[in-house]
Image: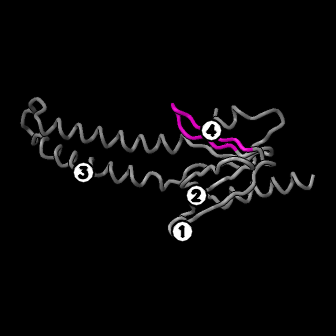
Amino acid sequence: MSFVDQNLIPGETVLYRTRLHWIVLLVPAFISVIFAVPAILFLKGTIPAAGTKAGPLDLIAWVALVCAVISLVIIGAGMLYRSSTEMAVTNNRVMMKTGLISRRSVEIVLSKIESLTVDQSIPGRIFGFGTVTVRGTGGTPETFMKIAHPLELRQKVQEQIGQKTIA
């Protein structure tokens, strides 16, 4: 069960969910490739030819194995970072949570939101990600970077604030 679902109050419903954009995986993927290529090249040079007897792992094979493990750890950490970040708009508040072991959560009641800013670079506009800054009344701004579909998040928050002021 997700953090958002676990922390809903009675009568509260989730209207919109988003998470980090896939673009956050580019740097881990690039670094992972830097380690994976030498691992493949080292292993290619250490695989015995057909019909020959394989010996114990030599130094090159160990280096290849270490490079492969580092590559998998880096890409796994990137995927874990992406999947451990949640953002949601409910009918009462905006909820954002980052982290798995060390957790940081921000929950702002819709009536206390002063402004919501979306910043998108050119690549952000092309690929659909951006930085969202939520400013609550009397509070410090909460900034979340590389959010998928930031304009939809802003629209959902504004729709809910508009419905709260009409009612």
Q: Residue at 12% across / 41% down in the picture?
A: 46
Relative vertical location of residue 27 with respect to residue 77 in this rendering, above or below? below
Disc ID at residue 158: none
Are dots 1 and 2 in contact, CB under 8 Å?
no
Give the SS element for disc 3.
helix
Give the SS element for disc 1.
helix
Q: Quadrant of the N terminus?
A: top right
The three-letter code of the residue at mark 2 reads: Thr
Q: Which residue is mark 4?
A: 105
- Mark 4 and mark 2 lie on one chain; the one further toward the N terminus is 4
Residue stretch in magenta: 95-108
Are dots 1 and 3 in contact, CB under 8 Å?
no
Q: Residue furthest left?
A: 52
- Whole-angstrom CA distance, mark 4 to mark 2, is 17 Å
Disc ID at residue 37: 3
- Whole-angstrom CA distance, mark 1 to mark 2, is 14 Å
Give the SS element for disc 2.
strand
Q: Which residue is mark 1?
A: 126
Residue 108 image offset from top left, x and y in percent:
72, 44
Label count reads 4
Q: Nearer the viewer, residue 130 or 149?
A: 130
Mark 4 Cα within 10 Å, few/some/many (few <14, many 20+)? some
Mark in the foreground, 1 or 2: 2
Residue 142 image offset from top left, x and y in percent:
62, 49
Are dots 4 and 2 in contact, CB under 8 Å?
no
Mark in the foreground, 1 or 3: 1
The three-letter code of the residue at mark 1 reads: Ile
